[in-house]
Image (cartoon, rainbow, N blue to C red):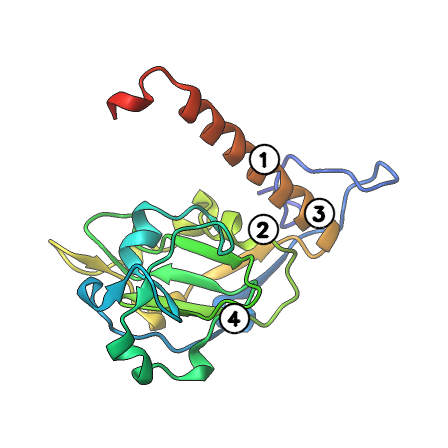
Amino acid sequence: MGKKEKAPCLRFKDTNGKDYPAWEQRKFYDCFKLLRNNSLARAELAKIGKIRNIHYGDVLINYPEVLNISTATVPFIAESRVNSISKDSYLENGDIVIADTAEDESVGKTTEIQGITDHKIVSGLHTIPCRPLVNFSPNFLGFLLNSPSYHDQLKPLIQGIKVSSISKKALGETRVCFAKDLDEQAQIGGFFNGLEMLITLHQRNSPYQNQL
């Protein structure tokens, strides 16, 4: 970040070729409100069902910064446990899901939820789901909250030895620095989303892909 204003040193330009406004910095819980999660284990999930469930293991390993629900493989809650799910825990487009437990410093890995149409989806075991209180452009938050500038704040707050975790209270001690202009957010999100797609394409075309 630059010293004179809260913003990256490298900036996109607006349509007039000028810098966007300085970025804004707020406490985490001034930007997000907590949602309800559930504690269903992997064994309580299924390949088919009515309600999809975000498991922390998938956030850490399988899901990208922005998860498109319409195309992603997301397990369902087993039919026998559906009645335990409250409707007020359903996720919406733009919500984020944070993995609060891991075996390393990947604790805090975040995925932004997009692509929900008629899907019912909830946040599961060892996750902290949040809904923005600030207007953010789609595809921006997932990259922002996984950036070193934000994630490095979590490292001194992580607890545990064999299994690491971060608490909701600790999240409240972090600060989120973000572009105030939605057009700048959209440009940033679009840039990194395009980069992710390019990396994925190269991995698919790699001669070593079948050996992994």
Q: Along the horizontal axis of the image, is 144 left or right of 204? A: right
The answer to which of 51 and 101 lies nearer the viewer is 51
Mark earlier in primary sequence (1, 3): 3
Q: In x, y percent, where is residue 62?
A: 34, 46
Q: In x, y percent, where is residue 79?
A: 28, 75
Give the residue displayed 31% in from the left and 53% down from the top: 58
> Which amino acid type is marked by label 2?
Asn
Can see residue 155?
no
Foreground mark, 4 or 1, reads 1
Pointer 3 local density, CA inside 10 Å: few below 14, some 14–19, many at least 20: many
Mark earlier in primary sequence (2, 1): 2
Identify the element where label 2 is drawn.
Answer: loop
Label 2 to label 1: alpha-carbon separation: 11 Å
Mark earlier in primary sequence (2, 3): 2
Which quadrant of the structure image shows residue 210? top left
Q: In x, y percent, where is residue 200?
A: 46, 31
Foreground mark, 2 or 3, reads 2
Foreground mark, 4 or 3, reads 4
Mark earlier in primary sequence (4, 3): 4
Task: Name the residue carrying label 1.
Answer: 194
Task: Name the residue carrying label 3.
Answer: 184
Give the residue displayed 46% in from the left and 48% down from the top: 65
Task: Name the residue carrying label 4.
Answer: 131
> Which amino acid type is marked by label 3?
Glu
Identify the element where label 4 is drawn.
Answer: strand
> Which amino acid type is marked by label 4?
Arg
